[in-house]
Amino acid sequence: MTGWQHFTFDSLPVSPWRNGGGETREIISYPPGKSDFDWRISIATVAQDGPFSAFPGIDRSITLLSGDGVYLQALPDIDHALTVTGEPFSFSGDIALSARLTGGVTTDFNVMTRRTVCAARVVPVRESLYFSLEKGGVIYVISGIWQRQDGTLIRAGEGYYWSEPAEHRRESLTLKPVEQVDGCLLLWASMIAPEHVSVP
């Protein structure tokens, strides 16, 4: 099947933060090679307390993947404990947050979208998932083993990404958990038209 690409956490390029507080592994940035992206999805490793940079005009979603999590603050607008694995939290990138670790090193799934172009829907999935690849997005397995419709197995730390396919190409993907549902969790992030969602 064309239009989507497999990746693993370990295969993603690593970019250390300039402040030494962590690193980012980019999954996809669209359009490719442009610094003023329409949307970008990555995994961040947070190793110490520190600020999150502001991104004017960008909406953000962050989801805990592993570790004890972080407290996100930008009073009076935001005071949020990101401590439950697989629960997305959305906020405006116009706000510069401070992040405080609740324990040790943590990893987070990050989605950024340019507000005037698109928005993101980020959904935790524990049961079977069927979706179209007509818009861009990423799936990423947090835990358990999942199976594609062709029998391929996908494990924790693996996923697929796709950008908007050609207009004539409408592909789909089906995933189902192989283990008990309680032990399987993945994230599905998809791009949608900006008027379909609002970011608090």
Image (cartoon, rainbow, N blue to C red):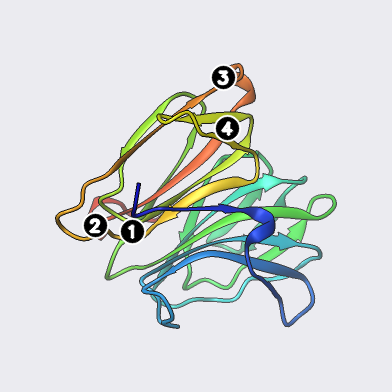
Depth check, mark 4 against mark 1: the one in front is 4
- Residue pictured at 47% horizontal, 24% vertical: 127
> Where does residue 197 sit, x and y in percent of width and height?
30, 51
Q: Earlier in the sequence, mark 2 or mark 3?
A: 3
Q: Nearer the viewer, residue 78 or 51?
A: 51
Residue ID for mark 1: 119
Q: Is residue 141 above or below residue 179?
A: below
Residue ID for mark 3: 181
Q: CA distance from mark 2 to mark 1?
A: 6 Å
Q: Secondary structure at mark 1?
A: strand
- In the current view of this chain or complex, which residue is farthest to the right? 104
Residue ID for mark 4: 185
Q: Residues within 10 Å of mark 4 (few under 14, many from 20)?
A: many
Mark seen at residue 61: none
Quadrant assignment, res 168: bottom left
Q: CA distance from mark 4 to mark 2?
A: 26 Å
Residue ID for mark 2: 193
Q: 32 left or right of 47? A: left
What residue type is disc 4 on? Leu
Q: Secondary structure at mark 2?
A: loop
Q: Considering the image in quadrants, where does the C terminus appear?
A: bottom left
Cβ–Cβ under 8 Å for marks 4 and 1 = no
Q: How many marks?
A: 4
What residue type is disc 3 on? Val
Q: 114 left or right of 74? A: left
Cβ–Cβ under 8 Å for marks 2 and 1 = yes
Q: Residues within 10 Å of mark 2 (few under 14, many from 20)?
A: few
Q: Is residue 42 above or below residue 197?
A: below
- Residue pictured at 52% horizontal, 71% vertical: 95
